[in-house]
Amino acid sequence: MTTAPTELDGRPLSLADRAYTAIQDRLIMLDIPPMAPIEDGALSEEIGIGRTPVREALKRLELDRLVVSYPRRGTFATAVDITDLAYISEIRAQLEPLAARRAAVTVGQPVRTELAALADRIEAGDVHAMDRRELMQWDLRVHRTMYRAAGNPHLEDTLVRYHNLATRIFCLFLERMAHFDRHVGEHVGLLRAIAVGNADRAEELARVHVTGFEKAVRAII
């Protein structure tokens, strides 16, 4: 007997939440390409969740600017507009350091231990041997864990939204980007700074990480 998927805090996910998470990941990893039509029946069958929860999820994803619906035309994945990079980075450069600082100051010892263990796993793994999709999954996991650790659900929601949009841009240029493993490796220092409560260091590393992302993308466009 399998257990139902849960939130990070252990609560079971509703069907609509499960649909939202599954479709969101397909959109941000570009498994559903930009501007591709989205048919709720086919998507429902693909992820094994009913059409009603899928429709609810698509409404939420429209608020996240990941899908767009047009009367009489249907629902589509949004385009990835590289001109949005500066706007997204401007917001993240302010809020990611804030989240890192909050996490370093406020998080409890069990989560500090979890963050340190996550840093150990990244450091012990052969980052060079990972394919780029696996590296992107690590990037998503680290950021979402840090946002949750900050302990402010409104800040978390905002950062998840803008990191998702940034990830779509990242995935668009992923194959042309050199030294992507270094980007993932930067997470180790950030996680360790939060784990030991070094708020100044965590804040600075988060800021450098975000600005470095924008520079890396701009270097290849």
Image: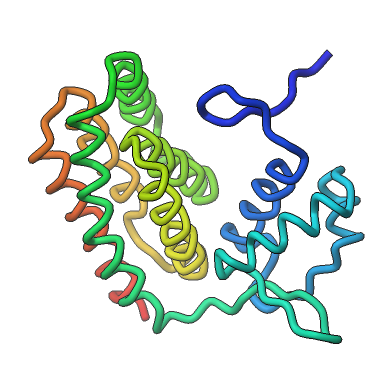
Q: Is residue 183 left or right of residue 43?
A: left
Residue 207 on image: x %, y %: 19, 54
Image vertical order of residue 15 relative to residue 26, above or below: above
Residue 200 on image: x %, y %: 8, 40
The residue sitting at 74% across, 46% down in the picture is 16
Q: How is the image coloured?
A: rainbow
The residue sitting at 31% across, 16% down in the picture is 113
Residue 104 on image: x %, y %: 20, 31
The residue sitting at 21% across, 31% down in the picture is 194
Number of numbered labels in the structure image: 0
* Quarter of the picture holding the N terminus: top right
Image vertical order of residue 119 relative to residue 33, above or below: above
* Quarter of the picture holding the C terminus: bottom left
Picture quadrant where residue 86 is located: bottom left
Picture quadrant where residue 85 is located: bottom left
The residue sitting at 25% across, 69% down in the picture is 215
The residue positioned farthest toward the left in the image shown:
200
